[in-house]
Amino acid sequence: MMDKAVFMIDFIRHQKIIRKDDITTNGYIRIPSKFLNIYLQKELRKYKEFLARYGYIKTIPYDKEHSKSYGYKDCFFEEKNQKIEIEEYIDYEFLSITYEKFLSKSLEQYARIEQKKTAAERTTKHLTKWLNGESIQADWQAAFKYIEECKSLSLDQKKQYSYSISRIRFNQWYYIRSTNDNRLHSNLTNLPATLRKFLAHNGQRLVSLDIKTSQPYLLAGVFFLLLENKTESLEFLKQGLRCKQVRDKFDTVMNSITLSDTVIADFKAYKSLVCENDIYSYIGSQLTPEFKSSIKSTNTKGGYIDSVYNSSLARKEKKHFKELRSYCKIVVLEYMYCSLENHAARLKELRRVYPNAVNNFIDDFKYCKELEIPKRVGKKRRNKRQKEKIAKSKKLFSKFLQQLEAFLILDVITKELSKINPRMFMATIHDSIIVTENYELEIKSYLNDRLYGILGVRAEIKTEYW
């Protein structure tokens, strides 16, 4: 059945989109065979061999040492004699409505997507009720024309872009609320920004209202509440942290802070840097001439080049930045996510620019006892358990900011807005609220005032017209 072959390719693509962090260095995604056997009615081996034989997919074997499943990637071209046969990217529809229904039912039953949807609806029904084909329409023909004619997109990007639009076109909506970051993930959060202009709600143009420098802003708000001794507000924020480990760490860090004159000055300096200046431009202006020279591009494009981590490829790769500000934005994000053992030159530069009390706050969040154990004691190295503990600890700070952001946007502000105007279309992409253009000013004002009421510091809200 061609539908089964098409479904297997589609499922590999879908897994790569929703599990970007699990993609291997060579672009494979590992999928348990027991899952695929359910979807393919126990004929996985036959379809895997067929698709691999004709070059539609590639596979890597089961990893016995780490107990990892077979890896798959869709591949429509083969390298032969150092020449690449270029394919025409194609969009397709399922051939059999009956089999499509079977696949959808199997997928929801076995992979528990329906359960995940239900879990998300328990806390965000006011948002998930709009994630369907009746509320959001895609001008898919214009989108495909744009994808086909866009010369800056690679062939692989064209595949991914067309896939994202196809799922909306055929009303294949999904949404889950992650336990790690507490965010609501959906087709919208994975949709490339350049394709947003092809979406609408009942013919009405959409706009997104974004919190500028969202995570640095939230951190500045926490510092302000701490300086003003707003214990009730801090307790309110703590209750919004979904993960017990993050809540406990937040308590530990807050209880360890002594508000000396130096610490107070540092927290105030950071608040001023975020709320009264452009933090990324400021950091760029404070980088040493020697460091700027080390990352300056020598090609005709100018700008800056540095090796940064690519989560999709799970490795570092050289990336070009047209301006220093966009580079500093990546560095700030990396600093929030990195281990305390990451001593990259750009992170050392950022630590030098940041006030010491802010660095110490971030370090305390990422600290664990295993970090005190030297990397090498004689011939011994850290064991697997110690490495895992360090890796988990480094994520606590980023989880703290992500869960705080999700709590304010999903559980407080949008929930309040839905009660004020239950018929108003509303969706979210992490730190942004999406509404129709006629509600732009009203919602922007409410978002700004409500954040100020909770955190005590003003946010800058950016408008992006779709």
Image (cartoon, rainbow, N blue to C red):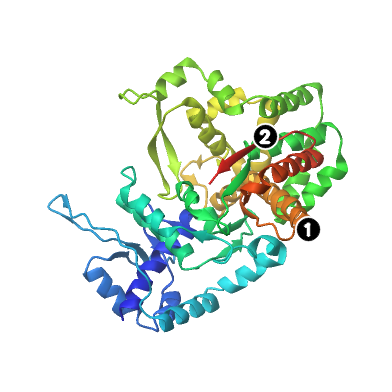
How packed mark 1 is, by other alpha carbons closer than 10 Å (few <14, some 14-19, many 20 or more), is: few
Q: Is residue 385 above or below residue 175?
A: above
- For image coordinates 45% across by 20% down, the residue present is 292
Quadrant of the drawing holding the N terminus: bottom left
Give coordinates of residue 118: x percent, y percent: 65, 71
Quadrant position of residue 456 = top right
Looking at the image, which residue sits at the far top?
289
Task: Pick whichever of labels 2 and 1 is earlier in the sequence.
Answer: 1
Please state which amino acid type lies under the numbered disc 2: Glu
360, 15: nearer the viewer:
15
Give coordinates of residue 411: x percent, y percent: 74, 55
Residue under numbered circle 2: 460
Kindly tell me whether residue 367 is visible in this rendering: no
19, 127: nearer the viewer:
127
Q: Report whether 391 appears left or right of 269.
A: left
Give coordinates of residue 234: x percent, y percent: 81, 43
Q: Is residue 459 above or below residue 35?
A: above
Q: Report whether 415 appears left or right of 399.
A: right
- For image coordinates 66% across by 60% down, the residue present is 127
Q: Report whether 105 appears left or right of 238.
A: left
Give coordinates of residue 107: x percent, y percent: 49, 75
CA distance separating discs 2 and 1? 24 Å
Please state which amino acid type lies under the numbered disc 1: Lys
Q: Secondary structure at mark 2?
A: loop
Q: Report whether 455 appears left or right of 424.
A: right
Residue under numbered circle 1: 419
Kindly tell me whether residue 141 is visible in this rendering: yes
Q: Does the residue at mark 2 contact the one at mark 1 (Cβ under 8 Å)?
A: no
